[in-house]
Image: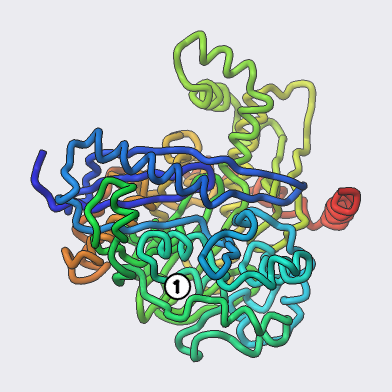
Amino acid sequence: MQQGPYVIGVDFGTESVRVGIFNLLGEPVIFAAESYPLYHPHPGWAEQQPEEWWRAFVTATRRALAESGIAPEAIAGIGADCTSCTVVFLDERFQPLRPAIIWMDVRAADQAGRIARADDPALKYNGFGNVSAEWLPCKALWVKENQPEVWQRARHVGEFIDWLTQRLTGEWVGSINNTSIRWYYDRNAGGWPGSLYEKIGLADVIERFPPQILDMGQVAGGLRSDVAAELGLRPGIPVAEGGADAFVAMIGLNVVSPGKLAFITGSSHLMLGQSATALHATGIFGAYTDAVMPGQFTVEGGQVSTGSVVKWFRDNFGGNAQAEAAARGIDAYTVLNEWAQRVPIGSDGLIVLDYWQGNRTPYVDPEARGIMRGFSLKHTTGHVFRAIIEGIAYGTEHILRTFRSNGYAVEEMVAAGGPTRSALWMQIHADVSNTPITLTEVTDAPALGSAILGAVGAGLYPDVTTAAGHMVRVRRRIEPNATAHAEYQFYIDQYIATYARVQDLIQATTRHVAERV
């Protein structure tokens, strides 16, 4: 094993933490993953326990070090990313007062509606349209109104990454990434939007926020001695400021300047791009000031439930596929992809809307729910699986159409995440959107992006742009099929037209179910 230096990139996802050790060429030496539970105490709710994050992180880190054979002295820096909009409420000793309310939780729909009506300039980040119930102010207001005893004891309010950084370094600092993309922080407008927080009844939250906001890659502090001993690392290693997983993945895909779009796939899909100028429009989140790179603006669109819907289908309705997979000694997803491959474009008229946990963009509707329509007795498991994948691709194209109609053209998507392992799924995305998709050598872009931040924090590269240029490499490019794209146009239009016609019915049912809980 080489002497190094090496950097650790930590990716905290929705269901597990993944710890990667990388060299300075961006080549992974090893990955180690450990899962943690996800709790759904009520429909639309989603929570996790911070201590379960920590136990998984310690286990994965120690395993990665042990199996790699790398000496602790060879680790030069640490960077991390976490799920965004995963909000923590901490006491004066930084101990959690309640489970973290994670990103997919949409309980704060009422608070989001009231915030959207606040008539404040800060709402430009929502395109002056609907506000997502995922965002921190909505969840903080929900806790203040529904759990006042927690609010009164909460001395610190932040996100997953802030909790992690404090646990690693002892420093209560915030990331320019999270604060700009989800807290309405705008460095060009003076920082915190005090008028907005005053209008929505959250003026007292600002004093609970981290007092210092750092750019990603800046040193947040050194690794605490007690934590170093727990992890099996040397104390004092520079810990770089991180950010939200998908936005850190932009760095891991080398999408750090205008032109390309990062296509982050997984439990959810995010589409993220850099712009030289500010862009604000209904149905588009952003453009956020300095969120990824200083002096640039970040444009965002996203789907709440994508890979999570595929997993839901496999776990609950994929028994035949799992049985065949077990008999053949392969993964159930491989079988489902084979079955879907034999189904024609459009899944013989079966159309799926991927709103299992609401719609992020362009509707920003937490009360939206999933729809499957067009069933006949001809439809098989393969039809439904393909229709789910196609429906997710239609949702992506709906977002890209919104981008295009507001002057933001997408010429290439650089993809990362678990769904990139499905050649069928990626080809469907390329065909539906008529846009080439580039895949990089390291498919775990969040972990690589975190490692890049760790390398910058350790002083191994002068800045994020230089580090990404050295540590990210292209593997292959998927070209769209023009014939398939033309055939998909009817189904895309059907997908987009569907929700407008049944929105009132779906929302009424969602509210009815919520009232009966």
Indicate the amino acid at tag 1: Gly
- For image coordinates 45% across by 85% down, the residue present is 187
Rendered view: 384 above or below 104 = above
Rendered view: 437 above or below 375 = below
Which quadrant holds residue 358?
Answer: bottom right
Res 261 seen here: no
The N terminus: image quadrant: top left
Residue 151, image x, y percentages: 69, 70
- For image coordinates 61% across by 68% down, the residue present is 136
**Is 462 placed left or right of 45 in the picture?**
left
For label 1, the SS is strand
Circle 1 residue: 174
Which quadrant holds residue 91?
Answer: bottom right
Check the image and name the residue furthest to the top.
Answer: 327
Residue 472, image x, y percentages: 25, 53
Rendered view: 505 above or below 459 = above
Total labels: the figure holds: 1
Q: Nearer the viewer, residue 418 or 1?
A: 1
Residue 43, image x, y percentages: 77, 47
